[in-house]
Amino acid sequence: MSPLWTRRQVLTQLGIAAAAVHTLDPHELCCAVPAHAETADKDLFELKKVGDGVYAAIAAPRFKVNCNAAVILTDDGVIVVDSHSKPSAARALYGEIQGITKKPVKKVINTHFHWDHWQGNGAYAAASPGVEIVASERTRENLTRPDAGVGGIPYIEKQIAAMPAEIDKLKDDIRKTSDPKLKANLESNLQQAESFYQELKQMKPALPTRTVSTTVTLAEQGREIRLHVLGRAHTDGDLFIYMPRERVVATGDAVIDWMPFLNDGFPEDWVHTLSNLEKLDFDQMIPGHGDVKPKAHLAFFRGYFVELIESVKKAAAEGASLDEMKKTIGDRLAPKYEAAMSRYPIGQYRDRVGLNVEMVYLKVVKKS
Ligand SMILES: [Zn+2]
Ligand SMILES: [Zn+2]
Protein backbone atom coordinates (compact mmCIF):
# COMPACT_ATOMS: atom_id res chain seq x y z
CA MET A 1 0.00 0.00 0.00
CA SER A 2 1.17 3.53 -0.64
CA PRO A 3 2.87 5.20 2.33
CA LEU A 4 0.29 7.94 1.99
CA TRP A 5 -2.89 6.30 3.17
CA THR A 6 -6.13 8.10 3.56
CA ARG A 7 -7.58 7.94 7.04
CA ARG A 8 -10.58 6.12 5.65
CA GLN A 9 -8.45 3.46 4.00
CA VAL A 10 -6.62 2.76 7.22
CA LEU A 11 -9.71 2.88 9.37
CA THR A 12 -11.42 0.47 7.01
CA GLN A 13 -8.44 -1.79 7.09
CA LEU A 14 -8.31 -1.68 10.85
CA GLY A 15 -12.05 -2.13 11.16
CA ILE A 16 -12.33 1.01 13.24
CA ALA A 17 -15.55 2.89 12.76
CA ALA A 18 -15.34 6.56 13.55
CA ALA A 19 -18.61 6.33 15.45
CA ALA A 20 -17.09 3.85 17.87
CA VAL A 21 -14.36 6.18 19.00
CA HIS A 22 -14.80 7.41 22.55
CA THR A 23 -14.61 10.92 23.81
CA LEU A 24 -11.25 12.20 24.86
CA ASP A 25 -9.66 11.31 28.12
CA PRO A 26 -9.28 14.52 30.15
CA HIS A 27 -5.72 13.48 30.99
CA GLU A 28 -4.39 13.83 27.52
CA LEU A 29 -3.11 17.27 28.22
CA CYS A 30 0.21 16.22 26.64
CA CYS A 31 -0.31 19.00 24.45
CA ALA A 32 -3.31 21.18 25.23
CA VAL A 33 -2.29 24.73 25.87
CA PRO A 34 -3.63 27.62 27.90
CA ALA A 35 -4.63 30.83 26.17
CA HIS A 36 -1.63 32.50 24.59
CA ALA A 37 0.35 32.04 21.41
CA GLU A 38 -0.24 34.52 18.70
CA THR A 39 2.74 33.44 16.66
CA ALA A 40 2.24 33.69 12.93
CA ASP A 41 2.88 30.54 10.91
CA LYS A 42 6.11 31.95 9.54
CA ASP A 43 7.44 32.17 13.08
CA LEU A 44 6.52 28.64 14.10
CA PHE A 45 10.11 27.45 14.40
CA GLU A 46 13.43 28.94 15.31
CA LEU A 47 16.27 27.12 13.61
CA LYS A 48 19.30 26.87 15.88
CA LYS A 49 22.56 25.48 14.59
CA VAL A 50 23.86 22.76 16.94
CA GLY A 51 26.61 21.33 14.73
CA ASP A 52 27.94 21.42 11.22
CA GLY A 53 24.82 20.92 9.07
CA VAL A 54 22.66 20.01 12.08
CA TYR A 55 19.89 22.27 13.38
CA ALA A 56 17.35 22.20 16.16
CA ALA A 57 13.99 23.57 15.04
CA ILE A 58 12.59 24.90 18.29
CA ALA A 59 8.80 25.14 18.14
CA ALA A 60 7.01 28.30 19.24
CA PRO A 61 4.02 27.82 21.56
CA ARG A 62 0.79 27.23 19.70
CA PHE A 63 -2.74 26.39 20.81
CA LYS A 64 -2.16 22.90 19.39
CA VAL A 65 1.41 22.25 20.33
CA ASN A 66 4.13 21.41 17.85
CA CYS A 67 7.16 19.37 18.78
CA ASN A 68 10.71 20.40 18.05
CA ALA A 69 12.43 18.87 15.04
CA ALA A 70 16.04 18.04 14.30
CA VAL A 71 17.13 18.99 10.80
CA ILE A 72 20.15 17.16 9.40
CA LEU A 73 21.67 18.11 6.07
CA THR A 74 23.41 15.52 3.93
CA ASP A 75 25.02 15.82 0.51
CA ASP A 76 21.91 14.57 -1.29
CA GLY A 77 19.03 15.66 0.87
CA VAL A 78 17.63 16.55 4.26
CA ILE A 79 16.65 14.34 7.18
CA VAL A 80 13.97 15.68 9.52
CA VAL A 81 13.31 14.18 12.93
CA ASP A 82 9.61 14.48 13.88
CA SER A 83 6.87 16.25 11.96
CA HIS A 84 4.69 18.15 14.47
CA SER A 85 0.95 18.07 14.97
CA LYS A 86 -0.19 19.06 11.48
CA PRO A 87 0.90 19.22 7.85
CA SER A 88 0.84 23.05 7.79
CA ALA A 89 3.48 23.09 10.55
CA ALA A 90 5.65 20.63 8.61
CA ARG A 91 5.27 22.83 5.52
CA ALA A 92 6.23 25.91 7.57
CA LEU A 93 9.40 24.18 8.77
CA TYR A 94 10.18 23.00 5.25
CA GLY A 95 9.91 26.63 4.13
CA GLU A 96 12.52 27.57 6.72
CA ILE A 97 14.76 24.66 5.73
CA GLN A 98 14.69 25.93 2.17
CA GLY A 99 16.37 29.06 3.45
CA ILE A 100 19.37 26.83 4.25
CA THR A 101 19.30 24.31 1.41
CA LYS A 102 17.20 23.66 -1.68
CA LYS A 103 17.74 19.91 -1.39
CA PRO A 104 14.64 17.76 -0.88
CA VAL A 105 13.69 16.00 2.35
CA LYS A 106 14.67 12.39 1.80
CA LYS A 107 13.96 10.92 5.24
CA VAL A 108 11.62 11.64 8.10
CA ILE A 109 12.28 9.93 11.42
CA ASN A 110 9.53 9.72 14.05
CA THR A 111 10.82 9.46 17.63
CA HIS A 112 7.49 8.08 18.92
CA PHE A 113 3.81 7.78 18.02
CA HIS A 114 2.33 10.82 19.78
CA TRP A 115 0.10 13.08 17.71
CA ASP A 116 2.32 16.14 17.99
CA HIS A 117 5.34 14.27 16.54
CA TRP A 118 3.98 12.53 13.45
CA GLN A 119 0.78 14.14 12.14
CA GLY A 120 2.79 16.27 9.68
CA ASN A 121 4.37 13.22 7.99
CA GLY A 122 1.87 13.47 5.15
CA ALA A 123 3.22 16.88 4.10
CA TYR A 124 6.65 15.39 3.44
CA ALA A 125 5.22 12.31 1.72
CA ALA A 126 3.11 14.53 -0.55
CA ALA A 127 6.07 16.80 -1.39
CA SER A 128 8.56 13.96 -2.05
CA PRO A 129 6.89 10.70 -3.06
CA GLY A 130 10.12 8.77 -2.46
CA VAL A 131 10.55 9.98 1.11
CA GLU A 132 11.45 7.28 3.58
CA ILE A 133 9.69 7.47 6.95
CA VAL A 134 11.58 5.68 9.71
CA ALA A 135 10.40 4.73 13.20
CA SER A 136 10.85 1.93 15.68
CA GLU A 137 8.88 -1.21 15.04
CA ARG A 138 6.81 -0.56 18.15
CA THR A 139 6.00 3.01 17.09
CA ARG A 140 4.81 1.71 13.73
CA GLU A 141 2.50 -0.69 15.56
CA ASN A 142 1.28 2.00 17.96
CA LEU A 143 0.33 4.26 15.08
CA THR A 144 -2.44 1.88 14.08
CA ARG A 145 -3.42 0.50 17.49
CA PRO A 146 -6.77 1.83 18.75
CA ASP A 147 -5.63 1.79 22.38
CA ALA A 148 -2.04 3.00 22.10
CA GLY A 149 -2.56 6.41 23.73
CA VAL A 150 -2.36 9.99 22.51
CA GLY A 151 -1.30 9.34 18.95
CA GLY A 152 -1.84 7.24 15.87
CA ILE A 153 -4.53 6.99 13.23
CA PRO A 154 -7.38 6.07 15.61
CA TYR A 155 -6.41 9.09 17.71
CA ILE A 156 -6.92 11.38 14.72
CA GLU A 157 -10.56 10.29 14.80
CA LYS A 158 -10.72 11.05 18.52
CA GLN A 159 -9.39 14.54 17.93
CA ILE A 160 -11.91 15.13 15.15
CA ALA A 161 -14.70 13.97 17.45
CA ALA A 162 -13.51 16.28 20.25
CA MET A 163 -12.89 19.46 18.27
CA PRO A 164 -16.48 20.80 17.98
CA ALA A 165 -16.88 20.84 21.78
CA GLU A 166 -13.45 22.42 22.15
CA ILE A 167 -14.37 25.12 19.64
CA ASP A 168 -17.71 25.73 21.39
CA LYS A 169 -15.94 26.14 24.71
CA LEU A 170 -13.53 28.70 23.26
CA LYS A 171 -16.49 30.63 21.82
CA ASP A 172 -18.17 30.49 25.21
CA ASP A 173 -15.02 31.68 26.99
CA ILE A 174 -14.71 34.57 24.52
CA ARG A 175 -18.30 35.61 25.26
CA LYS A 176 -17.70 35.49 29.01
CA THR A 177 -14.48 37.47 29.20
CA SER A 178 -14.23 41.24 29.36
CA ASP A 179 -10.43 41.36 29.58
CA PRO A 180 -9.25 42.58 26.16
CA LYS A 181 -5.90 40.78 26.29
CA LEU A 182 -7.44 37.47 27.29
CA LYS A 183 -10.15 37.92 24.68
CA ALA A 184 -7.54 38.49 21.96
CA ASN A 185 -5.65 35.37 23.02
CA LEU A 186 -8.83 33.31 23.06
CA GLU A 187 -9.78 34.60 19.63
CA SER A 188 -6.35 33.60 18.34
CA ASN A 189 -6.81 30.16 19.90
CA LEU A 190 -10.26 29.86 18.33
CA GLN A 191 -8.86 30.65 14.90
CA GLN A 192 -6.08 28.10 15.41
CA ALA A 193 -8.55 25.50 16.68
CA GLU A 194 -10.82 25.96 13.65
CA SER A 195 -7.97 25.61 11.17
CA PHE A 196 -6.60 22.59 13.08
CA TYR A 197 -10.05 20.98 12.85
CA GLN A 198 -10.08 21.50 9.08
CA GLU A 199 -6.58 20.05 8.76
CA LEU A 200 -7.52 17.01 10.82
CA LYS A 201 -10.52 16.29 8.63
CA GLN A 202 -8.40 16.45 5.48
CA MET A 203 -5.38 14.68 6.91
CA LYS A 204 -3.71 11.97 4.83
CA PRO A 205 -1.52 10.31 7.42
CA ALA A 206 1.76 8.82 6.22
CA LEU A 207 2.92 5.82 8.21
CA PRO A 208 6.55 4.71 8.57
CA THR A 209 7.89 2.88 5.52
CA ARG A 210 10.86 1.42 7.38
CA THR A 211 11.17 0.23 10.96
CA VAL A 212 14.07 -0.54 13.24
CA SER A 213 13.99 -2.77 16.30
CA THR A 214 17.55 -2.35 17.46
CA THR A 215 20.38 0.15 17.04
CA VAL A 216 21.05 0.93 13.39
CA THR A 217 23.66 3.17 11.82
CA LEU A 218 22.63 5.18 8.78
CA ALA A 219 25.50 6.20 6.54
CA GLU A 220 24.04 9.24 4.85
CA GLN A 221 26.43 10.69 2.33
CA GLY A 222 29.33 10.81 4.73
CA ARG A 223 27.24 11.66 7.79
CA GLU A 224 26.88 9.04 10.48
CA ILE A 225 23.49 8.90 12.16
CA ARG A 226 22.76 6.23 14.73
CA LEU A 227 19.20 5.28 15.60
CA HIS A 228 19.16 3.89 19.13
CA VAL A 229 16.47 1.75 20.70
CA LEU A 230 17.46 2.10 24.36
CA GLY A 231 14.42 0.76 26.21
CA ARG A 232 10.97 1.97 27.23
CA ALA A 233 10.61 5.52 28.51
CA HIS A 234 8.05 8.11 27.34
CA THR A 235 6.49 5.31 25.25
CA ASP A 236 7.37 1.70 24.52
CA GLY A 237 8.84 2.67 21.15
CA ASP A 238 11.11 5.66 21.80
CA LEU A 239 13.86 6.16 19.25
CA PHE A 240 16.96 8.28 19.94
CA ILE A 241 18.85 9.86 17.06
CA TYR A 242 22.55 10.20 17.78
CA MET A 243 25.20 11.92 15.70
CA PRO A 244 28.56 10.94 17.19
CA ARG A 245 30.67 13.30 15.15
CA GLU A 246 28.54 16.35 15.90
CA ARG A 247 28.01 15.14 19.51
CA VAL A 248 24.27 15.77 19.38
CA VAL A 249 21.30 13.58 20.27
CA ALA A 250 17.60 14.13 19.45
CA THR A 251 15.53 12.58 22.21
CA GLY A 252 11.86 13.03 21.36
CA ASP A 253 9.81 13.41 24.54
CA ALA A 254 12.00 11.01 26.53
CA VAL A 255 13.82 14.23 27.47
CA ILE A 256 12.00 17.54 27.38
CA ASP A 257 12.52 20.95 28.89
CA TRP A 258 8.99 20.81 30.31
CA MET A 259 7.54 18.54 32.96
CA PRO A 260 7.40 15.03 31.50
CA PHE A 261 4.15 13.46 30.29
CA LEU A 262 3.83 9.97 31.78
CA ASN A 263 0.44 8.70 30.60
CA ASP A 264 1.82 6.42 27.88
CA GLY A 265 5.15 6.02 29.67
CA PHE A 266 7.01 3.57 31.90
CA PRO A 267 8.43 5.50 34.87
CA GLU A 268 10.90 2.92 36.20
CA ASP A 269 12.12 1.88 32.75
CA TRP A 270 12.47 5.56 31.89
CA VAL A 271 15.19 5.95 34.55
CA HIS A 272 17.19 3.05 33.07
CA THR A 273 16.69 4.23 29.51
CA LEU A 274 18.02 7.68 30.39
CA SER A 275 21.04 6.02 32.01
CA ASN A 276 21.60 4.13 28.74
CA LEU A 277 21.34 7.40 26.85
CA GLU A 278 23.87 9.00 29.20
CA LYS A 279 26.46 6.39 28.18
CA LEU A 280 26.54 7.87 24.68
CA ASP A 281 29.21 10.49 24.11
CA PHE A 282 27.52 13.80 23.28
CA ASP A 283 27.31 17.43 24.41
CA GLN A 284 23.87 18.67 23.37
CA MET A 285 20.34 17.34 23.33
CA ILE A 286 17.53 18.44 21.03
CA PRO A 287 14.57 17.65 23.31
CA GLY A 288 11.02 16.97 22.15
CA HIS A 289 9.87 20.31 23.62
CA GLY A 290 11.67 23.35 24.99
CA ASP A 291 15.14 24.55 24.20
CA VAL A 292 18.39 22.76 23.32
CA LYS A 293 19.90 21.41 26.53
CA PRO A 294 23.41 20.41 27.62
CA LYS A 295 24.04 16.78 28.52
CA ALA A 296 24.01 17.77 32.21
CA HIS A 297 20.22 18.26 31.98
CA LEU A 298 19.87 14.51 31.63
CA ALA A 299 20.92 13.82 35.22
CA PHE A 300 18.56 16.53 36.51
CA PHE A 301 15.64 15.22 34.47
CA ARG A 302 16.28 11.62 35.52
CA GLY A 303 16.63 12.78 39.13
CA TYR A 304 13.05 14.01 39.01
CA PHE A 305 11.84 10.53 38.09
CA VAL A 306 13.97 8.87 40.77
CA GLU A 307 12.67 11.20 43.50
CA LEU A 308 9.09 11.05 42.24
CA ILE A 309 9.05 7.24 42.22
CA GLU A 310 10.69 6.97 45.65
CA SER A 311 8.28 9.53 47.11
CA VAL A 312 5.17 7.84 45.73
CA LYS A 313 6.28 4.39 46.90
CA LYS A 314 7.03 5.69 50.39
CA ALA A 315 3.78 7.65 50.69
CA ALA A 316 1.76 4.68 49.44
CA ALA A 317 3.46 2.36 51.95
CA GLU A 318 2.53 4.83 54.70
CA GLY A 319 -1.11 4.69 53.64
CA ALA A 320 -1.45 8.17 52.12
CA SER A 321 -4.40 8.78 49.81
CA LEU A 322 -3.77 9.76 46.22
CA ASP A 323 -4.97 13.31 46.89
CA GLU A 324 -2.64 13.63 49.87
CA MET A 325 0.27 12.32 47.78
CA LYS A 326 -0.39 14.80 45.00
CA LYS A 327 -0.28 17.69 47.44
CA THR A 328 2.60 16.64 49.69
CA ILE A 329 4.89 15.27 46.98
CA GLY A 330 4.16 18.22 44.71
CA ASP A 331 5.19 20.59 47.52
CA ARG A 332 8.18 18.52 48.64
CA LEU A 333 9.83 18.28 45.21
CA ALA A 334 9.03 21.89 44.29
CA PRO A 335 12.15 23.62 45.68
CA LYS A 336 14.36 21.49 43.45
CA TYR A 337 12.24 21.18 40.30
CA GLU A 338 9.51 23.82 40.07
CA ALA A 339 11.48 26.78 38.69
CA ALA A 340 13.51 24.75 36.19
CA MET A 341 10.43 22.93 34.96
CA SER A 342 8.20 25.98 34.56
CA ARG A 343 10.15 27.97 32.00
CA TYR A 344 7.47 27.99 29.30
CA PRO A 345 3.76 28.77 29.21
CA ILE A 346 2.98 25.08 28.84
CA GLY A 347 4.11 21.89 30.54
CA GLN A 348 4.74 23.64 33.85
CA TYR A 349 5.51 21.95 37.15
CA ARG A 350 2.21 22.71 38.91
CA ASP A 351 0.16 21.78 35.82
CA ARG A 352 1.56 18.29 35.73
CA VAL A 353 3.03 17.20 39.05
CA GLY A 354 -0.30 15.89 40.37
CA LEU A 355 -0.88 13.84 37.23
CA ASN A 356 2.71 12.58 37.36
CA VAL A 357 2.15 11.41 40.96
CA GLU A 358 -1.06 9.67 39.88
CA MET A 359 0.63 7.96 36.93
CA VAL A 360 3.50 6.69 39.08
CA TYR A 361 0.99 5.47 41.67
CA LEU A 362 -0.98 3.58 39.00
CA LYS A 363 1.95 2.26 37.00
CA VAL A 364 4.54 1.53 39.71
CA VAL A 365 2.59 0.93 42.94
CA LYS A 366 -0.71 -0.49 41.67
CA LYS A 367 0.80 -1.82 38.44
CA SER A 368 -2.50 -1.36 36.63
ZN1 LIG B 1 5.38 15.90 22.39
ZN1 LIG C 1 5.09 12.52 23.40
Image (cartoon, grey):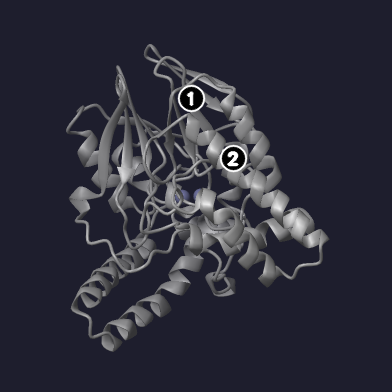
The kind of residue tagged 1 is: Tyr
Q: Is residue 334 left or right of residue 345?
A: right
Per the image, the residue denoted by label 2 is 302
Looking at the image, residue 87 lies above or below residue 283: below
Can you tell which mark lies on residue 242?
1
Q: Residue at x 59, y 40 (%)?
A: 302
Q: Secondary structure at mark 2?
A: helix
Q: Residue furthest bottom?
A: 176
Q: Is residue 143 left or right of residue 57?
A: right
Q: Secondary structure at mark 1?
A: strand
Q: Quadrant of residue 169?
A: bottom left
Q: Residue furthest top?
A: 222
- Give x and y (percent) for residue 187: 24, 74
Which of these two is toward me, 285 or 310? Answer: 310
Mark 1 is surrounded, within 10 Å at the Cα level, by few (under 14), some (14 to 19) or many (20 or more) other residues, namely many
Q: Check whether the beta carbons of the residues at disc 1 and disc 2 lie within 8 A of each other.
A: no
Looking at the image, residue 194 lies above or below residue 4: below
Q: Residue at x 54, y 71 (%)?
A: 26
Q: Is residue 80 left or right of residue 10?
A: left
Q: Residue at x 42, y 14 (%)?
A: 245
Q: Is residue 49 left or right of residue 285?
A: left
